[in-house]
Image (cartoon, rainbow, N blue to C red):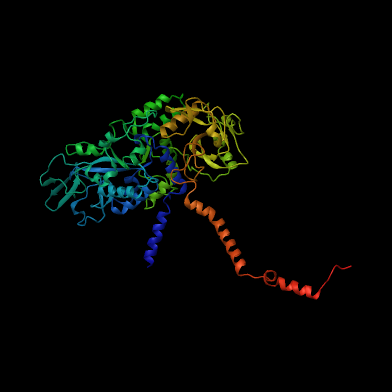
Amino acid sequence: MWFYWLLFACSLAQESNWPDLSDRADSALRAERDIAMDIPIDQHTPFGISANRLIFDIQGYSTDALGTLRTALNVGIDAVMLDVYWNEYTGRWQLCPAPIPQSATNNRSETVSVSWKGNTYKCQPSFGDSDVYTTLRDYLRSSNTNSQANVVQLVLNLKSILNDTVVVRSNSTNSTSLVTGPAPTSISPGMVVYSPEYMELGNSSLSDPLSSLGSFLFLPTDLDRTSPLNSTVAYDDEYPSQQDFLYSLYKRALVTAVTDEYRNSSNGYNVTVSDAKKIFFYGQNNFTSSHTDEDVLQECFDRRLRPYDPNYYNNRVSETRFRMLIDSNNNRFTPETAHQALQCGYMPVLNASVYPLLNRTNLTGEYTGRVLNNFSPFAYWAWAPYEPDSTYSNVTRLSLDFSEMRPRDDDHDDDDDDYDVGHDDDPDWQQTAMSQVAEKCVVMKRNGWAVENCYNKYRLACKHKNNAFEWTLSHEISSYFSTNQADCPKNYKFGVPHSSTEQLALQNFLNSSSVVYPVWIDLNDITISGCFVDGGPYAQCPYKRAVTTSNLIRSVAPSVVVAVVILILIFFERFFLSTPIHTNRRRHWKRTINQHYKKNDYEGVPS
């Protein structure tokens, strides 16, 4: 019995290292998804992980690790990269990075250790990519509701297990030796060279196992079925908007493939027509894949400080799709740089072998949860880290956000001279409300969205009605509750960035204009806590009514109970409770008066 209690305790310890999908994280994910409903899916910016580096390399390539993958999906990972290997010895695609010798085991459900090219892996022969696809399908089924449905991108990272080793058997007078390695340059007497025998694992087709995703899978052939976007939106209409993808086409996932590490050879795999009908390939159709050692983030940082040009962003969304940034052991992401990648419009993929975890380097079953715990507060293109957070008082926020209430560092010298502006309220930029507090409205700060007091007064971010990348500010400061009367310039309206590229354009405008942060954006959860919506202070939450039947019952129930109790007391008092004065009045008042007159019989008028 003690063994089961110990196993239960260990499972709780590992589970505690996972980031719960808290109310804050749930609100952040849903707000980011909802605000981007009108954006085509090729311009979305999810947060991604490599299933191989963060899960299978740690826990083994076996079905036991699928629970960790499912948990990662549950806590908000919307993109998964999966390394799949073309085994030239067997002519099949497999997940295990090494070929498994025939002699390794007779039980294909058993996990065995295999060595290959200096590395050792734990692999279950029966485990393959189809098991991963089935886990993904089960997640899509369980989350297929209006409030939980999301777009999931599966990236296949194609690699090769090259047929470049042989087994050399050398016969001498006293012994026989077997050596596996590169083919010898010459054959000596008594030497026999032959190919090693490996298990035939996986599938001969790259795309056939994807059929397990069923109707959830969006195919390249589905592009002809997409409905065009509104002509005023500055995006191409080749790919469907998220709204159409989820709720018109009823799709949930798409599969892409990168071939940077795939090596062609005479025994290589040729992409088939069937593959091209199910998989989108990077390097084609403006699909953009980059690595962290290519100075992509530095270029983005420089772009924020350059003169503001809306046309740059219009060109960017038409020339690049599904932008992805993959890290490595030489240049791995930190939570901060992953957040920068998201805000620059790139999907970051955690692909390094090890991430520092509070001076712990041992890789255990809890490793994946600890990594995601570190990164999850930074996993949004829209929100600043640890937002939305409405727990601070207004005075506390003023202290914490002192550095936000200033123009940018114009001379780039990192001194304090530029930070003095904005410490006190400036009537041209901000006015802090001290007596009224409603932490329900959202502002744009240097590192993303943050919840602020709706009674504070700031400038408004105004978006052009016909160009989503063209921004300006309102003429005056105002509280959020007055934004429906605010005076954005002609052809502009109070707006909110709907994509990472729109937000990058807004940040570029604010920096180049020396604007004092923060500024109001059109987002709030005034009506229902945690349900962030655009449309001004009176916008309604699409998932909950402000007055529902249950809310109404809870609000009137106390009054109804009190009224019923009072009526019951009146009823009992009326029919069951008798008091002496009531009895005299009802039954004996006439007799009492008659007796009084008999004892005091007066005739005539007293003199």
Is 164 positioned to the left or the right of 303 in the image?
left
Quadrant position of the C terminus in the picture: bottom right
Image quarter in which the N terminus is found: bottom left
Say if 334 sits above or below 197 in the image.
above
- Residue 330: tell me if it is visible: no
Of all residues, the one furthest to the left in this rendering is 189
Expressed as whole percent of the image width and height from the top left, the position of residue 545 reads 47, 46
Q: Position of residue 302 (x, y in %)?
A: 44, 28
The residue furthest right is 607
Regarding residue 202, the answer to whether it shows in the image is yes
Q: Within the image, what quadrant is residue 560 found in?
A: bottom right
Number of marks drawn = 0
Judged from this view, the residue extending furthest toward the front is 604
Q: Nearer the viewer, residue 358 or 131?
A: 131
User: Left or right: 179 with respect to 595?
Assistant: left
Judging depth in this view, the residue of 511 and 21 nearest the camera is 21
* Residue 503 percent across, percent down from the top left: 44, 33
Would you place residue 583 above or below residue 369 in this image?
below
Taking depth in this image into account, of 153 and 179 the one nearest to the observer is: 153
**Residue 527: x percent and y percent?**
50, 43
Left or right of 275? Residue 587 is: right
